[in-house]
Amino acid sequence: EETRTLDLSRAGVSFIGRRSYRSGMALHIGFPEVQTLPRGKRELTARVVRVSQLSPVRQKAVAVQFEDLDLASLVFSELLRVRTRISSALLGIIKALTSGGEMVTVIEDICWATERAMEAEKALLFLRNRQGDALSAHSPLVGDFEDFHVLLGQGLVGRAAKEDKLSNVPDLRKDPRFRPRIEKYFDERTRSVLCIPLSKEGGVSPGVLAVLNKRYGSFTREDEALGKAVASQISLVLR
């Protein structure tokens, strides 16, 4: 079952559970956030040491002890790194959103903070127009801005907004959804793309955060989780 963690350390973990647990029971505990570790090292074997009944009656607080403390220490350190990275990224986004500047400046700061957090070459924030049938983005140039537009449902960005579905594209030129004649914001240097829709509003996403060219390799599951957290924060402020 998926559970909510109460406390985590290198020695063990306590969590809220609904299933039947008893002292001495052997468990396998997975940590899906830790995508940089090999699959076999994302799961720890543990043994239940204490079970406490909670209210409501069906819930229990379960305390377990990890059997391989060296592996647990590795997982714990990586989990801490991932969560620190997300917290740092969100802090940069919050600073940009609460700067009190003009919208164009705020969007530029959001994109800059996203690029830094995601280790990417470029980020674009597409927002839906008042009619709701197209999205627009502003890309900073030397002393000016370049405007980009795409209809809802067209290309990677338009489909991400309409379908409310994240797209992780490791090779842009090989993706059939890419429309080079329409999506001019993806130039010949664009390799990998991560399109994250903002939270739905009225059945359609109010915008899309597009992150271009991971500096080292392709965008990972960890990057996807970070992108979703950033997009969620932007959505809250835009409402």
Image (cartoon, grey):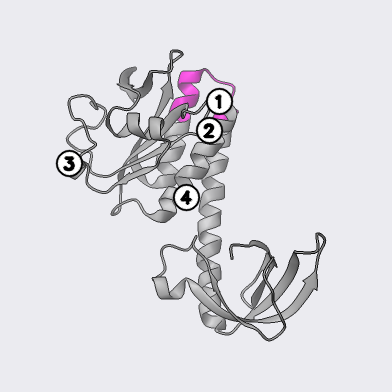
Q: Nearer the viewer, residue 57 or 197?
A: 57
Badge 2: residue crowd in 10 Å (few <14, some 14–19, many ≥20): many
Mark 1 lies on a secondary structure that is helix
Residue type at tag 1: Leu
Classified by dominant secondary structure, the portion drawn in magenta counts as: helix
For image coordinates 53% across by 27% down, the residue present is: 201
Q: Which residue is mark 1?
A: 238
Mark 3 lies on a secondary structure that is helix
Q: Are marks 1 and 3 in contact (CB under 8 Å)?
A: no
Separation of disc 4 and disc 1 at Cα? 20 Å
Instruction: Name the side, left or right, on which 211 lies relative to 93.
Output: left
Q: Are marks 4 and 3 in contact (CB under 8 Å)?
A: no
Disc with the residue nearer the chain's start (4 vs 1): 4
Separation of disc 2 and disc 3 at Cα? 29 Å
Q: Are marks 2 and 1 in contact (CB under 8 Å)?
A: yes
Q: Which residue is mark 4?
A: 225
Q: Which residue is mark 3?
A: 173
Residue type at tag 2: Ile
Residue type at tag 4: Ala
Disc with the residue nearer the chain's start (4 vs 2): 4
Report the disc number at residue 234. 2
Q: What's drawn in magenta, residue-wise? A: 96-109
